[in-house]
Amino acid sequence: MLARRLADRIREQGPLPFDEFMQAALYDPDEGYFASGPLRSAREGDFLTSPEVSPLFGVTLARFVEAEAARIGADPVTVVDAGAGSGSLLRALFDAARVGIRAWAVEVSPAAREALRLFVPEAAVVEQMASVEPVRGVVLANELLDNLPVALAVRRGAGWVERLVGVGPGGLCWEEGPARPEVAAWAERHAGAVGEGGLVETQIAAGAWLRAMVRRLASGAVVVVDYGDTGAGLASRRAEGTLRTYRHHHLGPDPLAEPGGTDITVDVDFGALAAAAEGAGAAVEVTSQAVFLERWGLADLLACRRAEELALARDGDPMERLRVRSLVTGGEALLHPRGLGDFRVLVARR
């Protein structure tokens, strides 16, 4: 069991920084949550992302890709889906795009890679981003960065300590120890006002990932879509932190309870991400998902589908009407202000 292996390592080497624990719990090649087991982003899995909620997400992103292709003069344009999951995003984007696309699907999960090869045979499916050539086009990261490892900084007095993973009589447990310099520096720069005992997920790996993607762009854009916030909107949640687990579409147990058995996720700090992308030379814009999708035509797509449903209600096939109604309902969910519409979208262009 992964828990036993981690406990043995801690007994030999001392408490484990949480980012190292999270890396093992999610990505251990034998027992990690994403690197083993079934496809996770499915109705019978643990969570759904926007592309599974509605194909109109991918259809709308196709309009963005077309605009980027025109801006940089790329035909075909490269599209990289990082953390491609079920393939729902790429499939809808391929079917809707009016420009030639050379696609890469990057996915650590063997089950997801198998599904991708069947569902999106046009795409080159690879396990690591290192296999992808320099990009002239668009890199998409939909609900990827919330799963990148984070270190946990806790405010103590005027400074910071780290929340670590230790071993107690009952198994894995939380401990505190001195903060590594890079963890304390990230917290000082990005955490904002945090009271005594406040918890901050220091998202060093997410910033490094985004800087690497920006530098990989010959020209084009990186698009990050995730739950999170910037500034005061995120700082207000930092008394308890945002670390949580998911299983079967519901909140799961403590992250230490079943390493490898649950999703582990945090709210993404888009202010820190914007700073990372700008530092790598990108022009950055952050909006809500609702604003982004409406800008690229989702409202118009929904208006057309509603008119189609109305016509079908008068004298059409009832089953076709239900199909169109399902598209409308799913598309509306993408814009809901207390749900997916309140996700953030960061676009970093070169």
Image: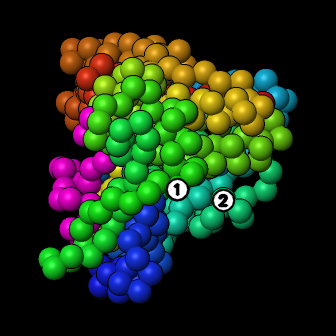
Point out residue 302 in the picture as x, y percentages from the top left corner: 38, 18
Residue range corresponding to the magenta coloring: 239-258
Q: Quadrant of residue 217?
A: top right
Name the amino acid type tagged 1.
Arg
Depth order, front residue of 157/283: 157
Question: Disc 2 residue type?
Answer: Met
Q: Which residue is mark 1?
A: 180
The quadrant of the rendering that contains the C terminus is top right
Q: Which residue is mark 2?
A: 129
Q: Please give the count of numbered marks on the rendered protein.
A: 2
Residue drawn at point x = 41 percent, y = 36 percent: 158
Q: Is residue 294 magenta?
A: no
> Judging from the image, what secondary structure is the residue with disc 1 in?
loop
Q: Is residue 198 left or right of residue 286?
A: left
Magenta highlight: main SS: loop
Find residue 264 and report its image quarter. Answer: bottom left
Circle 1 packing at 10 Å, graded few (<14), some (14-19), many (20+), is some
Disc 2 is placed on an element classified as helix
Classify 302 as above or below 15.
above
* Image side of residue 119 versus residue 101, left or right: left
Q: Give how far across and how far down residue 45 sits, in percent.
A: 27, 59
Above or below — where is 81 with respect to 297?
below
Between 65 and 300, the one lying in front of the other is: 65
Could you tell me if residue 314 is visible in this image? yes
- Protein image colouring: rainbow
Q: Residue at x 73, y 58 (%)?
A: 132
| Of residues 165 and 149, the one drawn nearer to the viewer in this rendering | 165
- Label 2, label 1: how many angstroms apart (C-alpha)? 28 Å
Question: Which quadrant, please, contains the N terminus?
Answer: bottom left
Question: Where is residue 331 drawn, in percent x and y?
Answer: 35, 27
